[in-house]
Image (spheres, helix red, strand yellow):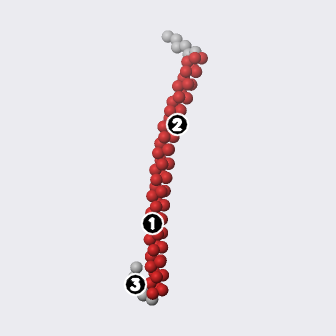
C-alpha cells in the first residue's frame, strides 16, 4: 500500500494549518477585548470612588475651616 502525497496535498495542509492558527488568534483577540473592557470598567469605578472621597474630604475641610472662623470646636 502506497500513500502518495502530491504538492496539492501539501498546500492544502498548509492552508488548513494557517486557517486553524487564524481562528485561534481571533478567539484570543476576543478574550483580550473582553479583559480590556473589564479593566476599563474597574478603572472607571475606582476613579468614581476616588472623586467621591475627595469631595467628601473637601466638605470636611470646609466645615473645619468654617468652625475655626466661628470659634467653635465641634467634631465633624
Residue that protrudes farthest toward the right in the picture: 7
Q: Give the x, y percent position of residue 32.
A: 50, 44
Q: Return the disc, 1 or 3, that comes first in the chain's sequence.
A: 1
Residue placed under numbered mark 3 in the picture: 74
Question: Residue at the spot x=46%, y=82% of the render?
Answer: 66
Residue placed under numbered mark 1 in the picture: 52
10 Å crowding of disc 2: few (<14), some (14-19), many (20+): few
10 Å crowding of disc 1: few (<14), some (14-19), many (20+): few
Residue placed under numbered mark 2 in the picture: 25
Question: Residue at the spot x=47%, y=45% of the render?
Answer: 34
Q: Nearer the viewer, residue 72 or 11?
A: 72
Residue that protrudes farthest toward the top in the picture: 1
Q: Nearer the viewer, residue 5 or 28?
A: 28
Q: Give the x, y percent position of residue 26.
A: 51, 36
Q: Give the x, y percent position of residue 56.
A: 44, 71
Question: Residue at the spot x=42%, y=86% of the render?
Answer: 73
Amino acid at each position: 500500500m502506497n500513500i502518495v502525497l502530491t504538492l496539492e496535498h501539501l498546500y492544502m495542509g498548509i492552508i488548513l494549518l494557517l486557517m486553524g492558527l487564524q481562528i485561534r488568534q481571533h478567539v484570543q483577540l476576543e478574550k483580550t477585548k473582553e479583559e480590556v473592557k473589564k479593566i476599563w470598567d474597574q478603572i472607571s469605578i475606582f476613579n468614581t470612588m476616588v472623586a467621591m472621597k475627595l469631595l467628601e474630604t473637601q466638605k470636611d475641610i470646609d466645615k473645619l475651616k468654617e468652625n475655626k472662623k466661628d470659634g467653635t470646636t465641634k467634631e465633624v
